[in-house]
Image (cartoon, rainbow, N blue to C red):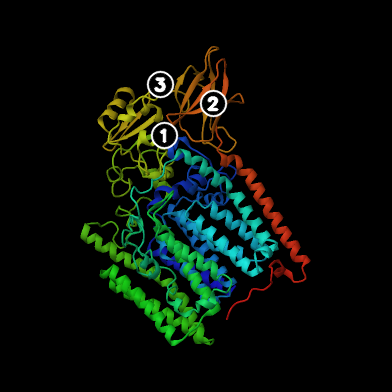
């Protein structure tokens, strides 16, 4: 247990220092606008431990099953959201999530390294280095699914490499977690691990035929299938909902534009202070030390006899994963649904240290020549970092010194077993945690320099984060508690449609709307406000051309023409059909739109930033009904709420004449999976202009009970998939345990040829 205790102590110490230096490290940009508030909202709205599927009050962003990143069909996410939803301090919530992912990744790497014979202190340092690698932390801090998905990769590998029943359980759990993680960019690399491990098992078994008949292969296959079954609702639901979402199209050129493709040399040689802003690598991680991984990951390459190493267990998988990650970083900017290859840096920064440390454990050699080459590699890292950012040369030198001293500590600890060797091992582990702090201090210098050159003052003393808006790491960047969000918001515990017209900076300002009381994306949920817009990763194909909101909810249409056009088949303008009974207009709303509300609605409030209107009582219809054609709806006895599994989203009492059918148009964005019943009998549900839900009510209905339910394929499969996956997992593990008991050789009898052999 020594390495695990040592790792946890070092990792917690590093996180505590980081928290003291940057309290908002895990709370900025997308974690503020998308993942954090939605996780909190889902946690607050759990029903018997299960989150809602849809909230029409949030408009196109309200279908949380259409974005697999939220994990609403994944029980592992339910546990996470249940914990995060209890918090009233958003910074505490963010650190709970970030620390969980960091420690999960580190423990997985440590367990994997120890299983393959890596010495304890080296494995501890390697796990700490991987868990604090540049891209994982500096990018994952605001793209939460990357952290969660990446953290499960070593656990999948560990489970597949085990030949014991508990390894099968780990394989099934990790397969499920990776597939339902919400990070589709992680899934291809999980497949690489599975294929590479199958190759290693074939080599271990002595051929393909012995492999497919071995208990190890059959057990792992059953565990993989069990994990896939549990993750199936998330995957199939994403496919079903994709018919109504739009993604960025492929580049309209032949070849690679280079946009957000990291420089290959930087990928291979990245050191602790190498920034990500190279070539055309831009975006939210441009000017941060995203290239860093375990500080000895590259220098120790020189101390492995690679030809001998690859005959040992684990090396083929590590090599395949590292190679796949490097190649993926050089893909075109957009490949199908996958975009921005810089995301794959996280795989390289996990796989490369594991590859090197596994090779070192089985075929490590220390000679003067190899030490000289390792020292030369440290010099190459230094030269590259200086060439990329010459003004930061003192920090690059400091980073190189830390790596060089860590290399010396490693060599001393490897050659001595006395107190000096133990002290060197401790120094190595401590130094492994230093580059993150060094990088943070370097980013403070960058921010302070920008404060002088650009006139920023709010983020002084905080690390620079290139997200296009100043003050995001500063002490005054939005609020820290739910109470602060509620006190600041223009809407609290209300459903209203907010038309925030203009570009991001015009609508939200440099403080992301804090001073104006309206926040980007999902952040309004922290105030209990559902505003008709939210963070939309992929626009709704029917609503996007009409409302043309940005991904964070501001309306950036050049004109309101489409909003004032009629809904097909009605005399109702789209602005009426899309608006709830309360509307808030920003001061930059076009005059045509403002005049419309001035003429037809009642203004109830107004200041320099916002005017609030209420639909007149005579124009209101029950619940979320926007228009009726040939249908009467009772003014009482209706109910609306969140869409949940096996529960109606809304109910109305309806009546039609005996001669013709009628229709009910709802202010509910249409998604595949909506169905309606009248007194238990199915009735047609269609999409008006691919945008809103319309229910057809048959002729001759008298006081019928109309119920609208959101029942996508993921909800239909959730319980059967859970039962099937759990049942198969229990069966697989039980059979493996019985096989162990019957075998005179014990646990290793599950493997085809017994003990693993390491090359020395």
Asked if residue 147 lies left or right of residue 255, the reply is right
- Which of discs 1 and 3 lies nearer the camera? The answer is 1
- The label on residue 684 is 2
Position of 726 with respect to 452 (left or right) is right
Q: Is residue 606 above or below residue 416?
A: above
Residue at which label 3 appears: 570
Q: Is residue 100 above or below residue 557?
A: below
Q: Is 150 placed above or below 294 here?
A: above
Q: Position of residue 559 (x, y in %)?
A: 28, 33
Write down the residue under mark 1.
542
Choose the circle earlier in sequence order: 3 or 2. 3
Q: Are marks 3 and 2 in contact (CB under 8 Å)?
A: no
| Residue 480 makes an appearance in the image | no
**Quadrant position of residue 682:** top right
- Identify the image quadrant of the C terminus: bottom right
**Residue 655, image x and y in percent?**
54, 17
Between disc 1 and disc 3, whose residue precedes? 1
Few, some or many C-alpha atoms within 10 Å of disc 1 (few <14, some 14-19, many ≥20)?
many
Q: Secondary structure at mark 1?
A: loop
Q: Is residue 11 above or below residue 607?
A: below
Where does residue 480 sit, x and y in percent of width and height? Answer: 40, 52
Q: Position of residue 222 (x, y in %)?
A: 66, 56
- Name the residue nearer the viewer: 530 or 161: 161
Label 2 to label 1, Cα distance in Å? 19 Å
Earlier sequence position, callout 2 versus callout 1: 1
Mark 1 and mark 3: span between their CA atoms?
Answer: 17 Å
- Distance from disc 3 to disc 2, alpha carbons, whole Å, reads 18 Å
């Amino acid at each position: 247990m020594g390495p695990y205790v040592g790792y946890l102590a070092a990792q917690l110490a590093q996180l505590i220092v980081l928290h003291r230096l940057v309290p908002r490290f895990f709370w900025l940009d997308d974690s503020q606008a998308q993942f954090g508030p939605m996780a909190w909202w889902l946690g607050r709205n759990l029903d018997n431990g299960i989150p809602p599927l849809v909230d029409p009050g949030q408009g196109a962003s309200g279908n949380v099953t259409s974005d697999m990143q939220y994990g609403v069909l994944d029980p592992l996410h339910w546990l996470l959201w249940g914990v995060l939803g209890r918090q009233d301090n958003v910074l505490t919530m963010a650190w709970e999530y970030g620390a969980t992912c960091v420690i999960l990744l580190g423990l997985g790497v440590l367990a994997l390294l120890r299983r393959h014979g890596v010495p304890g202190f080296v494995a501890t340092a390697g796990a700490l280095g991987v868990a604090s690698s540049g891209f994982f932390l500096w990018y994952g801090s605001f793209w939460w699914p990357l952290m969660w998905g990446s953290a499960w990769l070593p656990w999948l590998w560990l489970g597949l490499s085990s030949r014991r029943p508990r390894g099968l359980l780990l394989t099934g759990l990790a397969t499920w977690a990776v597939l339902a993680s919400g990070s589709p960019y992680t899934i291809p690399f999980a497949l690489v691990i599975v294929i590479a491990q199958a190759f290693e098992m074939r080599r271990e078994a002595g051929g393909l035929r012995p492999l497919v008949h071995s208990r190890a292969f059959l057990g792992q296959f059953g565990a993989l299938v069990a994990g896939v079954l549990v993750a199936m609702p998330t995957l199939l639901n994403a496919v079903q909902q994709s018919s109504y979402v739009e993604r960025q199209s492929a580049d309209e050129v032949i070849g690679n534009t280079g946009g957000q493709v990291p420089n290959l040399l930087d990928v291979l040689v990245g050191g602790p202070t190498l920034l990500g802003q190279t070539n055309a690598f831009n975006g939210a991680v441009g000017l941060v030390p995203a290239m860093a991984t375990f500080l000895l990951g590259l220098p120790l390459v020189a101390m492995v006899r690679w030809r001998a190493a690859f005959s040992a267990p684990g090396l083929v998988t590590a090599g395949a994963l590292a190679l796949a990650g490097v190649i993926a970083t050089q893909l075109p900017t957009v490949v199908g649904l996958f975009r921005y290859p810089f995301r794959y840096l996280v795989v390289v920064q996990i796989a490369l240290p594991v590859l090197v440390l596994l090779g070192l454990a089985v075929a490590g050699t220390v000679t003067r020549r190899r030490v000289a080459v390792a020292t030369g590699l440290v010099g190459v890292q230094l030269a590259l970092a200086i060439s990329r950012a010459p003004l930061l040369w003192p920090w690059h030198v400091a980073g190189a010194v830390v790596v060089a001293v860590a290399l010396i500590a490693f060599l001393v600890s490897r050659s001595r077993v006395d107190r000096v060797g133990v002290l060197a091992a401790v120094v190595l582990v401590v130094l492994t945690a230093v580059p993150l702090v060094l990088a943070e201090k370097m980013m403070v210098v960058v921010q302070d320099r920008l404060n002088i050159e650009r006139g920023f003052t709010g983020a002084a003393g905080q690390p620079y984060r290139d997200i296009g808006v100043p003050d995001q790491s500063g002490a005054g960047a939005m609020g820290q508690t739910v109470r602060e969000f509620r006190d600041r918001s223009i809407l609290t515990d209300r459903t209203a449609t907010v038309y925030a017209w203009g570009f991001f900076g015009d609508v939200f300002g440099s403080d992301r709307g804090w001073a104006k009381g309206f926040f980007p994306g999902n952040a309004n949920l922290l105030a209990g406000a559902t505003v008709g817009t939210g963070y939309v990763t992929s626009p709704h194909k029917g609503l996007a051309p009409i409302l043309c909101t940005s991904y964070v909810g501001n309306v950036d249409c050049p004109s309101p023409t489409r909003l004032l056009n009629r809904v097909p088949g009605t005399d109702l303008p789209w602005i009426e059909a899309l608006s709830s009974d309360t509307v808030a207009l920003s001061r930059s709303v076009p005059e045509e739109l403002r005049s419309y509300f001035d003429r037809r609605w009642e203004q109830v409030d107004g200041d320099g930033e916002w005017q609030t209107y209420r639909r007149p009582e005579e124009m209101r219809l029950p619940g979320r009904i926007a228009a009726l054609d040939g249908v009467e709806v009772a003014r009482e006895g209706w109910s609306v709420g969140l869409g949940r599994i096996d529960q109606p989203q809304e109910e109305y009492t309806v009546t039609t004449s005996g001669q013709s059918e009628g229709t009910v148009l709802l202010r509910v964005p249409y998604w595949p999976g909506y169905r309606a019943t009248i007194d238990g009998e199915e009735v047609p549900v269609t999409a008006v202009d691919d945008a809103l839900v319309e229910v057809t009510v048959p002729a001759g209905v008298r006081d019928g009970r109309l119920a609208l339910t959101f029942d996508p394929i993921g909800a239909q499969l959730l319980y059967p998939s859970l039962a099937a996956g759990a049942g198969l997992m229990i069966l697989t593990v039980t059979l493996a345990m019985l096989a162990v008991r019957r075998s005179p050789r014990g646990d290793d009898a599950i493997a085809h040829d017994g003990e693993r052999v390491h090359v020395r």
